[in-house]
């Protein structure tokens, strides 16, 4: 009687979001914050990409919100790209911005809004 043992090693890496540029961004008060996040998922693209400012979801449509915030998300064969634009940056826009895809690890950048 002969026994054969088969061993398979599968290495799985989680999909990862990546915010283009350095981990800290410096902008002048009144200018535009522009952040671009890429998600390279080789199987299923994320069904959504959410942006957080600190721990709160960035609100684009709130009538009580600051306004001047837009989001553009593009899905292609090579992955998904999400662009967050915050116009007329104010000091309250300083902080961590996190790109949170539905099926990938998040990426975070710290934005400093400088007075003058």
Image (cartoon, rainbow, N blue to C red):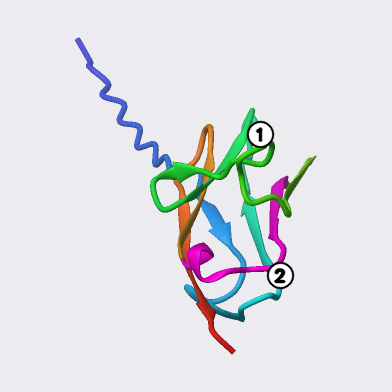
Left or right of residue 45: residue 72: right
Marking on residue 30: none
Left or right of residue 43: residue 6: left
Q: Mark 2 highlights which residue?
A: 32
Furthest-top residue in this view: 1
> Which residues fall within the magenta stretch?
79-94
Image: 63 above or below 51:
above
Mark 2 or mark 1, which has the lower sequence index? 2
Left or right of residue 71: residue 110: left
Q: Residue at x 42, y 40 (%)?
A: 12
Residue 82 in the image: state x and y as whole percent. Answer: 69, 49
Q: Secondary structure at mark 2?
A: loop
Residue 42 in the image: state x and y as whole percent. Answer: 63, 40
Image: 7 above or below 58:
above
Mark 2: few/some/many CA within 10 Å (<14, 14-19, 20+): some
Closer to the eye: label 2 or 1: 2
Q: Mark 1 highlights which residue?
A: 45
């Amino acid at each position: 009687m002969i026994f054969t043992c088969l061993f398979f090693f599968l290495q799985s890496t989680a999909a990862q979001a990546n915010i283009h540029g350095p981990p800290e961004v410096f902008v002048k008060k009144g200018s535009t914050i522009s952040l671009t996040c890429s998600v390279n998922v080789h199987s299923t693209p994320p069904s959504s990409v959410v942006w957080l400012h600190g721990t709160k979801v960035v609100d684009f449509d709130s009538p009580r919100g600051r306004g001047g915030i837009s989001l553009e998300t593009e899905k292609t064969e090579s992955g998904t790209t999400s662009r967050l634009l915050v116009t007329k940056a104010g000091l309250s826009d300083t902080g961590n911005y996190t790109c949170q895809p539905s099926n990938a690890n998040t990426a975070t950048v710290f934005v400093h809004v400088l007075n003058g």
